[in-house]
Amino acid sequence: MELLFKISFLILSALFAGIVLFLSTVLRETFNALTEERYYSVYSEIIIRGRKSIIINIIVLVPILIFAVYLICGFRNLLFIIGSLLYIFGSFVSSILINEPAYTQLLNMDINDQAGIIRIRGLLNKGNIVRAISSFLGILLVGISIY
């Protein structure tokens, strides 16, 4: 049963880590090449659609539920716990602390506020890099815990 929890957690968290890694590398470079006006229009659409995405919400929230049930069942593999907490920090906590406030600021911002858009762009770049690194390290530890 413990192995099933670990594998389920690993699959879903790896999907999200891949998305965030893509966002923090390829898309970040693409977005950085856009003018502030184009960045605002494209990224604001991504934010709105991402918040509504059932699949993204499942990929983020179900591993947290799996982790909670894992602990409730009494399993205590230290590598899995540390990896899961890193993933949860990268996928959920850092998003709430860094990305969501920046998303809200961007959506409420005047499209002509170029200095504000540049500031938010930098904050989101840093936030997505933190998310990618901690999520990746978390799934790496979860994968190692399976062996």
Image (spheres, helix red, strand yellow):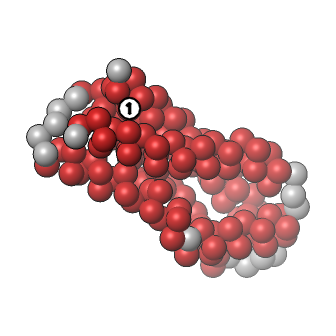
Residue 62 located left or right of residue 34: left
- Look at the image and tell me whether residue 101 can be seen: no
Q: Amino acid at mark 1?
A: Val
Measuring 51% from the left and 70% from the top, which residue is drawn there?
54
Residue 84 located left or right of residue 22: left
Measuring 78% from the left and 72% from the top, which residue is drawn there?
41
Residue 79 located left or right of residue 36: left
Residue 127 x, y percent position in the rendering: 57, 48
Q: Quadrant of the C terminus?
A: top left
Quarter of the image where one finds residue 60: bottom left
According to the picture, the residue beneath numbered tag 1 turns out to be: 142
Residue 142 x, y percent position in the rendering: 38, 32
Residue 6 x, y percent position in the rendering: 33, 38
Quarter of the image where one finds residue 77: top left
- Look at the image and tell me whether residue 108 can be seen: yes
Residue extending furthest toward the top: 147
Q: Residues within 10 Å of mark 1 (few under 14, many from 20)?
A: many
Q: Nearer the viewer, residue 121 or 80?
A: 80
Q: Nearer the viewer, residue 118 or 83?
A: 83
Residue 79 located left or right of residue 111: left
At mark 1, the secondary structure is helix
Q: Nearer the viewer, residue 111 or 129?
A: 129
Q: Is residue 63 above or below residue 100?
A: above
Count up the numbered dots: 1
Q: Nearer the viewer, residue 115 or 48?
A: 48
Q: Quadrant of the N terminus?
A: top left
Residue 115 x, y percent position in the rendering: 76, 62
Q: Is residue 119 above or below residue 125?
A: below
Measuring 83% from the left and 50% from the top, which residue is drawn there?
30
